[in-house]
Image (tube, rainbow, N blue to C red):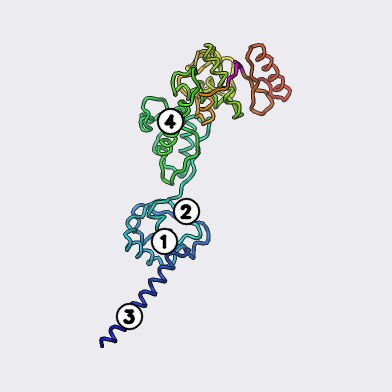
Amino acid sequence: MLWLGLAAALLCAGALAAGYSAAERWYRAPLAGLTAPAVVEIAPGEPFGRVAERFAAAGLLDHPRVLAWIARFDGKSSRMRAGEYALVPGLSPKALLEQLVEGRVLLHPVTLVEGWTFATALASLHDNPVLKRVVSGPEEPKLMALLGSPDVAPEGELFPDTYLVPRGATDLDVLRLAHARLEERLAAAWASRLPDLPLASPYEALILASIIEKETGAPEERPRIAAVFVNRLRRGIKLQTDPTVIYGLGAAYDGSLHRRDLTTDTPYNTYTRERLPPTPIALAGGASLAAAVRPVDDDSLFFVATGLGDGRHTFSSTLQAHNAAVARYVGRLRAGGGGRP
């Protein structure tokens, strides 16, 4: 009887060992049903066993109970994180379990564009189906306090870039990321500034950068555009830049600047007021920030579009040369049927 019992025990042990070996191979082999990329979502508080069964019902996973047993045995079933997950062919049950436990969720790109206003950026976030809306609008009280900067206006306080966020993130989450990035980039730019700039603070550099952002579509021109404004600030000459006037008009801007617009005073009318406007007028990118604090060595005081449709400008150091450049611009516009500049 002793030998019979020992033989039976050995047979059971052998069967268990064979079963364990097969389970181990399955656990580390690619999921047979995952032949194309798939996206799955796990709800908060959803039991692991139910998730495994859902994966099996979708044809992504065989032996869901085995995976659920392994997760429970390893103490991982209660550590699974809710969210949206991207599954790719070649993923094994082991790697799947690790992905769910570590919370490596699918991240979605959310882009804020250079030159946008804060209101435009927030509207874009509100239109994004990935995000949840918690901010009512750009005028929401204490919005900047929520971003960690209670004493500044929101305009220009976001860095235009692409941010990766999970589905279900809020508009406020993105605003916090973009504001923190702006503070980092602005501090770095200010630390690299040229000496003797006519700018009293990083905030003034940000204001200037926002104007540069709106003034040119040719990236390589930004340091020279900056030089014109810096030269004017040094000499006490009004900036006379149209984008600030347009910003100051707000909803009253009808798509064209009129002479009355240039003479009607607002805090942002740089034809009627000296120095910089009180706040930025748009989101400034890294190139504009760099240009604002490191303009080229250039004596130009004026610039006007070339009229060639290339987004470039003609720069001049005298009013006479500038007037000639304006005449060429107007002539090209009229020759092309553009009418008044």
State the image coordinates of residue 249 (x, y, percent, origin top left).
51, 21
Work out how far the residue at label 1 is from the one at label 4, CA to CA, in angstroms. 41 Å
Work out how far the residue at label 3 is from the one at label 1, CA to CA, in angstroms. 30 Å
Name the magenta segment's main secondary structure.
loop
Q: Is residue 131 visible?
A: yes
Q: Which residue is mark 1?
A: 94
Q: Nearer the viewer, mark 3 or mark 4?
A: 3
Residue type pointed to by label 3? Leu
Residue type pointed to by label 1? Lys
Which circle's residue, 4 or 2, is located before the other in the chain? 2
**Of helix, strand and loop, which one carries label 4?**
helix
Residue type pointed to by label 2? Ala
Q: Residue furthest bottom?
A: 1
- Residue that appears at 60% across and 28% down: 220
311 magenta-colored: no
**Of helix, strand and loop, which one carries label 3?**
helix
Above or below — where is 3 with respect to 309? below
Cβ atoms under marks 2 and 3 closer than 8 Å: no
Q: Characterize the local packing of mark 4: few (<14), some (14-19) or many (20 or more) Cα atoms within 10 angstroms.
A: some
Look at the image and give the residue range highlighted in magenta: 297-302
Work out how far the residue at label 4 is from the one at label 2, CA to CA, in angstroms. 32 Å
Which circle's residue, 3 or 1, is located before the other in the chain? 3
Which circle's residue, 1 or 4, is located before the other in the chain? 1
Q: Which residue is mark 3?
A: 10
Work out how far the residue at label 1 is from the one at label 2, CA to CA, in angstroms. 15 Å
Which circle's residue, 1 or 2, is located before the other in the chain? 2
